[in-house]
Image (tube, rainbow, N blue to C red):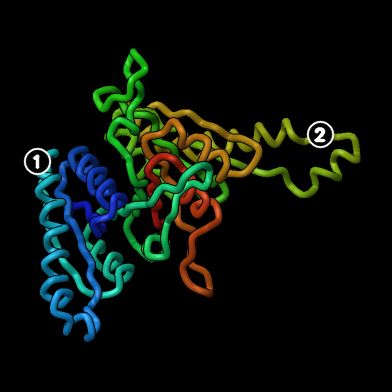
Amino acid sequence: MDRMITVGLDGSPESRAAAEWAAREAALRQVPVRLLHVWQPVPEPVVQAPLLGAETLQHWTERISREAAEGLRRRHPGVEVTIEQRAGTSADALVDGARDAELLVLGSRALSGLAGFLVGSVGQSVVAHAEVPVVLVRAGEQAADEHIMDPAGIPSAATGFRPVVLGLDTDSPDETVITFAFEEARRRRTALTVVQGWNLPPYYVYSLAAGVDPREDAVREQAAAVTEALLPWRGKYPDVEVTERSRLGSPADHLIDAARDASLVVGRRIRRNPFGVHIGAVAHAVMHHATAPVAVVAHR
């Protein structure tokens, strides 16, 4: 695998925000950025149209990538930026094009009000099938959004990063996902907030009926499970400050809440099943509603 970050670029505001985020991440990792533009073969009627032919379409697609690359080079002079054009189905081309990268970055369109964000069919398919971590960046994402406010309460990209947030499943913790989160926190020289949401077991109702409330024991057991799962990484990353949050309730809700003050949210893609690869309910909810960039990591 080459050390590079690949960005899916189509000229939309969300893909431009993704490219900017990728350039900032590339500076932290000291790797190049590759802008990958996918265009579909032109239907025959369009080819024959005098103003909308294949050559005109190719001109515009090449211009989108060229202008985006020039802008990134100006704003991020220390980052090498390359361009690649591919023809074919967008999702398949992005998944295939990211095989030799260490990270794939896509845009996610923001919706108004409380509706969250829109991760289209292409983005969801890519997240479900990519073998490398996929980061989703909302349209309008700015560098200052990932940093704490300055002493005057004004957004600034010159201050320290907000914490990285990791969603942890203590029933099946995955070392690839946990390592990714610790590495991102280390690169940003910021803290890592580990969030676990859990529900009471079905026998809880019967315990209450018997006059026993098992909640306190469950709280201690769940918190201890988080601590135990993180012990190896605390030793490997002694400079990363870790905050553990083990709370009763929906894991997705707790992650979305923590994302409000985060620079990056890290979660895992749910495993393959007999019907193919799919995205789990928690990852799906966080992808659509988290206000920070979301990294979905394919676990082994």
**Any mark on residue 74, and which?**
1
Instruction: Tell me the quadrant of the picture where the C terminus can be found.
Output: bottom left
Residue furthest front in the image? 50
Residue 29 to residue 88: above or below: above
- Element under disc 2: loop
Residue under the image location 34 percent in, 46 percent down = 139
Can residue 234 be seen here? The reply is no
Residue furthest top in the image? 152
Dot 2 amino acid type: Asp
On the rendered structure, is 209 left or right of 60? right
Q: Nearer the viewer, mark 1 or mark 2?
A: 1
Residue 150 position by quadrant: top left
Residue under the image location 39 percent in, 31 percent down = 163
Q: Mark 2 — residue? A: 213
Can residue 43 be seen here? The reply is yes
**Residue 28 versus residue 219: which sits nearer the camera?**
28
Residue under the image location 72 percent in, 30 percent down = 216
Residue 54 to residue 265: above or below: below
**Residue 23 versus residue 172: which sits nearer the camera?**
23
Residue 47 % position (x, y) = 17, 82
- Element under disc 1: helix
Residue 74 % position (x, y) = 9, 41
Residue 219 % position (x, y) = 67, 33
